[in-house]
Amino acid sequence: MNKSSPKRQIIHVDLDAFYASIEQRDNPELKGKPVIVGGKPESRGVVSTCSYEARRYGIKSAMPLAEARRRCPQAVFLPVDIPKYSQVSRQIHKIFQDYTPLIEPISLDEAFLDVTASLSLFGSAAAIAREIKERIKKELCLTASVGIAPNKFLAKLASDLRKPDGFVIVQEDQIQAFLDPLPIERIWGVGPKTAEELHKLGIRTIKELKNLDELILKKHLGLLGSHLYYLARGIDKRPVEPEREVKSLGRETTFPEDLKDKEVLQTYILELVTDIGRKLRKGSLKAKTITLKVRFADFSTLSKSKTLEHYTDLDKDIYRAACNLFQELCLKQPVRLIGVSVHNLTSGEIQQSLFQIDDTEQKKKLATTIDNIKERFGEDSITLARLLKKP
Ligand code: TTP
Ligand code: MG
């Protein structure tokens, strides 16, 4: 082992049945019952997650709620309460921070921690993982599954292996024995399509995958093939990346049929802007540069940008800028795709000019309220009159 680069120690933490466990914790009547988070069973939505009691009926994330009700009519159906789950997520993150600054959140309930440099202080990665699990249980009354390994790939596989309340360590000399029997579908990055490709080659387990030559894998799966060659050997050099800086945010839409009507196109722009504004506010970000992209029927593409005088997270400001850019374009042909993106982002509070006396705060409150309503009651629950005009 090289003294200057000690073997990495990575912990992957993933809470069990996250949204459903929070609901059960906050309402003891739900303990031990099948609980489904996602909305009303008569709605057209899907299951976000469900308690382990509900999983016994074959219910899982992304299943239509109606199907979940068919499988378990006595289940308790609850709406999704993102603000509540985000708050718990922040509390979990705070616990992580006591052990390392190298935290890479993957979602509200999942993160990688690189604790290599923390070992002299806390003993071992296993001791840290054990303590994190215990604190999550004691302080937040929730259970987490953890995986401890020399890299991210193995740590994630390990945390998933003994869910719920799992605790799995993959030691250096056990890597291949740990990997070999696992089906290839367990590999992070192998979706149904890749799995099918590999099945065609007669590959079902990681052991079988390991027998394939790197060149053959590359030939069939391109870069992913080469990546899989190394993963099958338990090699994954990807670092834990503490919260990556978001450099831009954007959305675009391709129309079912090319469009010419300016007013309709502007309504689409407003829809894209509304989504971007919401993402900005959710991430406590503000943007200064707005870019509009337009692709015409002949596939030629134009994009134009405008930098504002101050940072904003308000739909109204972004929409105004995007519309000005749109007016500057001469629409000679029908439009195939339209996209809006924001760049030049900053996080945290930006000092408002002392002389900027306007109703910004009020507008901001309104925007946040709309975001909360949408998150609680769904995308279509509230909308600007203009969006109702879309064909
Ligand atoms: P997961 O960690 O995938 O699921 P989970 O925590 O509910 O269950 P477990 O880890 O024990 O298997 O996702 C975390 C949360 O993300 C989950 O509680 C709800 C949400 N989620 C969705 O909203 N839609 C989805 O399709 C998935 C997979 C998760
Ligand atoms: Mg989870």
Image (cartoon, rainbow, N blue to C red):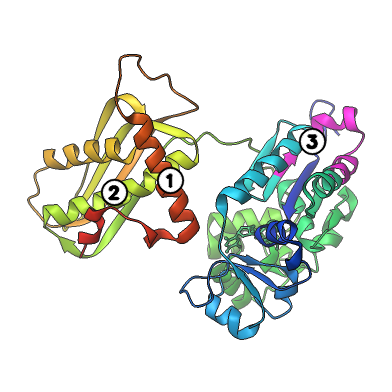
Residue nearest the viewer, comparing 166 with 76: 76
Q: Is mark 3 within 8 Å of ligand 2?
A: no
**The magenta stretch spans residue 129:** yes
Which badge, 2 or 1, comes first in the chain's sequence? 2
The alpha-carbon separation of the residues under discs 2 and 1 comes to 25 Å
Residue drawn at x 49%, y 35% is: 284
Q: Quadrant of ligand 2?
A: bottom right
310 to the left or right of 152 = left
Question: Is residue 335 among what the camera can see?
Answer: yes
CB atoms of marks 3 and 2 within 8 Å: no
Q: Mark 1 belongs to which amino acid?
A: Thr
Query: Which residue is disc 2 drawn over?
Result: 339
Work out how far the residue at label 1 is from the one at label 3, CA to CA, in angstroms. 39 Å
x then y, percent, for residue 337: 24, 55
Picture coordinates of residue 343, whole percent (x, y): 37, 34
Residue at the extreme top of the image, as rendered: 354
- Where is residue 368? Give x, y as percent: 43, 42
Q: How much space separates mark 3 and mark 2, taking CA atoms?
A: 41 Å
Residue 180 inside the magenta-drawn segment: no
Say which quarter of the image contains residue 72: bottom right
What range of the chain is rendered magenta?
A: 112-131
Badge number at residue 369 = 1
For marks 1 and 3 on the same chain, the one whose residue lies earlier in the sequence: 3
Observer-nearest of 373 and 182: 373
